Image (cartoon, helix red, strand yellow):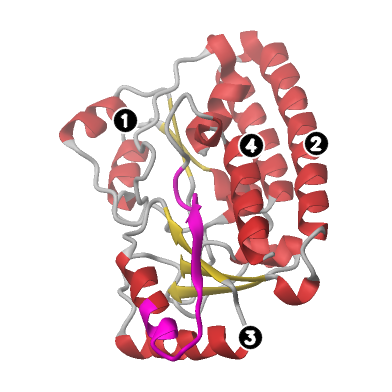
Amino acid sequence: MITDLVKNIGGDSINVQGLMGSGVDPHLYKASEGDVTKLANADIIFYGGLHLEGKLVEVFEKMAHQNIKTVALSDALDPKTLIRSEFFKGNYDPHVWFNIDYWKTITAYVVETLSEANPENKATFEANGKHYIMKLDALETEIKAIIETLPKEKRILVTAHDAFSYFGKAYGFNVVGLQGISTAAEAGVQDVQKLAAFIIENKVKAIFVESSVPKRTIEALQAAVNSKDHHVEIGGTLYSDALGNAGTEEGTYIGMFKYNVNTIVNALK
C-alpha cells in the first residue's frame, strides 16, 4: 500500500523500491541482508508504524541513527481518532489504510515529506498528490454506493484476523476477526467455537480468508459451523495486509479496495 502510494506521488521523479510484495504478512516480516543494504542506501524510508512492522523496529532505529530519514506514515494521524486494541498489548490498531479519509491525510503527509527532501520537484509532488486525492474521493463515493446495496443487518464481516476494524467503523460493518490485530497470535479451539456460535446466532452467510494469512484458521471455523448444521460459505479472499500481484487491478490500493468491497457485499447478499 505504501509503495503504491509513494509511486503515485513521486512518479518519475523518484526511485521507489518496496520491500514487501503481494501476499506478504508485515507483522511477521524480517529484513533480509539485501533489504538492509537497500535501506542503508535509501534517502527516505517510509513505513506504516504503530508496530505494524513488528520485526523491523530495530532495523528502522538503526537507520535513523545513520541519519537516514525514516518516516512512519501513521504519524500523520491524530492518535485520538485511532482504535486501541485489547489484543495488541494496548497499542493502536495499525491497519489505518482501510479508512480512505486517513489515506488522504497520509497522502498529504507523503507530498510534504518528499517536497522537503526534494524541493526542485515540489510542484510535481503537489500536483500528483492533488490528483491522487481526487481519485480517493471518487473511490469513497463508489464504495459507499456499493455498500448501500447491502442491508444493514447483513453487514457482519468475519475474517481471519482483526485487520478491518477501521473499515468497519468508517463504513458501518460489525467486524469480527478470529485472531487479534497481529497475526503473530494463533487462534485457539475456544476462539473458533465462540465465533462459530456467533455466526450461527447472527445467520452470517459468508466468512472470508485473507491473502496474507494462512487459510487453515478460517477453514477450521467453517468446519465448526457446518458441524452444527448451519451452512456458511467462504465468501472469497480479501486483501488485508498486502495488495494483489503487481500489474493487476488488485495490485493497487484503489483496485484492492474496490475488489474487497465487491467481494464482501456480493458474498453477504
Dot 4 or dot 1: first in sequence order is: 1
Question: Quarter-wise, where is residue 217 in the image?
Answer: bottom left
Three-letter residue code for mark 3 = Asn
Marks 1,3: beta carbons within 8 A: no
Q: Does residue 229 lie above or below 258 as drawn?
A: below
Q: Nearer the viewer, residue 70 or 87?
A: 87
**Which residue is depicted at the point 55% across and 83% down?**
199
Q: Nearer the viewer, residue 232 or 34?
A: 232
Q: Which residue is mark 3?
A: 202
Disc ID at residue 39: 1
Disc ID at residue 254: 4
Marks 4,1: beta carbons within 8 A: no
Dot 1 or dot 2: first in sequence order is: 1
Where is residue 63 drawn, in percent x and y? 32, 37
Query: Which quadrant is home to the C terminus?
Result: bottom right
Question: Distance from label 4 to label 3 (Cα)?
Answer: 31 Å
Marks 2,3: beta carbons within 8 A: no
Question: Distance from label 1 to label 2 (Cα)?
Answer: 34 Å
Question: Distance from label 4 to label 2 (Cα)?
Answer: 10 Å
**Which residue is depicted at the point 75% across and 17% down?**
127
Q: Which residue is mark 2?
A: 138
Dot 1 or dot 3: first in sequence order is: 1
Question: Quarter-wise, where is residue 147 in the image?
Answer: bottom right
Query: Badge 1: how crowded within 10 Å, few (<14), some, or many (20+)?
Result: many
